[in-house]
Image: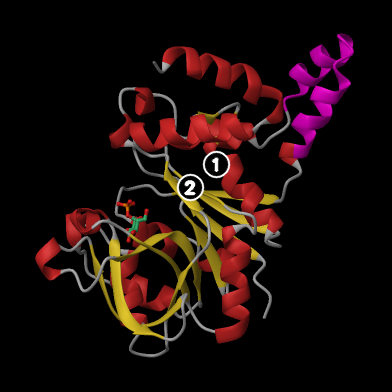
Amino acid sequence: MNIKKAVIPAAGFGTRFLPATKSVPKEMMPIVDKPAIQYVIEEAVEAGIEDILIITSRHKKSIEDYFDNEVELDILLDSKNKHEVVEKLKEITNLANIHFIRQKEAKGLGHAIWLAKTFIGNEPFAVILPDDLIYSDTPCLKQMIDQFNKYQSTILGVQRVDEDKVNKYGIISGKQLSEKIFEVDNLVEKPNVENAPSNVAIVGRYIITPEIFDILENLQVGVGGEIQLTDGLLKLLKNQSLYAYLFDGKRYDTGNTKGYLEAVVDYALKREDIREDFLMNLKSVIK
Ligand code: G1P
């Protein structure tokens, strides 16, 4: 079955990035000159996704506006003969069918995903956490979908992390079937180092089968008093095999200041129109 739908949870407050995120959604913070969320949407589109549901909240109206037409701006740009900019803006609104729903209470990632139940219906779907920006030759989500096509079951995108960071992630353990694939036998959300089953961490890419929705509907709150997707996946493991895939690519956690800065610098250096001047400036600063 083809994966055509994706869910992007973008309702969180962005408390790791205050004060900027007091009034600017973290998903709208620019990586060079594009909002972070646009990169993950482009990744989804490149992986063949056609319909995307973004879970927002009260303070995230600017995300909806960004994917809508801005008629006045188009008229102004046209009058100044900046037609190519108008075209570029149109491309953003036409990237995919983008849908929105609001999470009315901060009840956690599991609850946010549960809100996608009607949108998804009875088919496997992708989840992309927009804080996790992944640079790779083959889009990370495309790699994940290739694995889904092979295993026909839930696939979690994972990377190894330093032992002292396991308490920031959902951690899996399992039997390593090949260099890049584990058959999962346990998942723990944000364990202490002592209780962590491994250092293999879930990074924000998932392909999940629709059985997850009934599980999330009845799930008790977990770590942090929130309904955790990881806890739901642990229950799913009772009924189906789950696989974890060590994807290729460099991951940036753009939800915190350091990760964000790393992403901005690396992405600026990858841009041909910016690279030379930017590098010269960097070199003059780093002595
Ligand atoms: C979420 C998930 C966690 C996962 C992480 C990846 O946590 O709950 O399992 O490892 O994303 O970024 P959050 O970072 O939203 O606290």
Q: Which amino acid does label 1 sit on?
A: Ile
Q: Which residue is drawn at 24% across and 71% down?
A: 198
Q: Which image quadrant shows ligand 1? A: bottom left
Q: Within the image, what quadrant is residue 252 found in?
A: top left
Q: What residue type is labelled 2?
A: Pro
Label 1 environment density (alpha carbons within 10 Å; few <14, some 14–19, many ≥20): many
Magenta residue check for 138: no
151, above or below 102, in the image: below
**Magenta: main secondary structure:** helix
Q: Within the image, what quadrant is residue 35 found in?
A: top right
Q: Mark 2 points at which residue?
A: 130
Say whether residue 135 is left or right of residue 178: right
Q: Is any part of residue 144 visible from this angle?
A: yes
Which label number is shown at residue 115?
Answer: none
**Stretch of the chain drawn in magenta:** 70-91
Helix, strand or loop under label 2: loop
- Residues under numbered marks 2 and 1 in contact, where contact means CB atoms less than 8 Å apart: yes
Q: Within the image, what quadrant is residue 231 found in?
A: bottom left
> Could you tell me residue 120's position as x and y percent?
57, 68
Image quadrant containing the C terminus: top left
> Could you tell me residue 131's position as x and y percent?
43, 45
Magenta residue check for 88: yes
Q: Residue at x 49, y 51 (%)?
A: 250
Say whether residue 160 is left or right of residue 225: right
Q: Name the residue under label 1.
A: 37
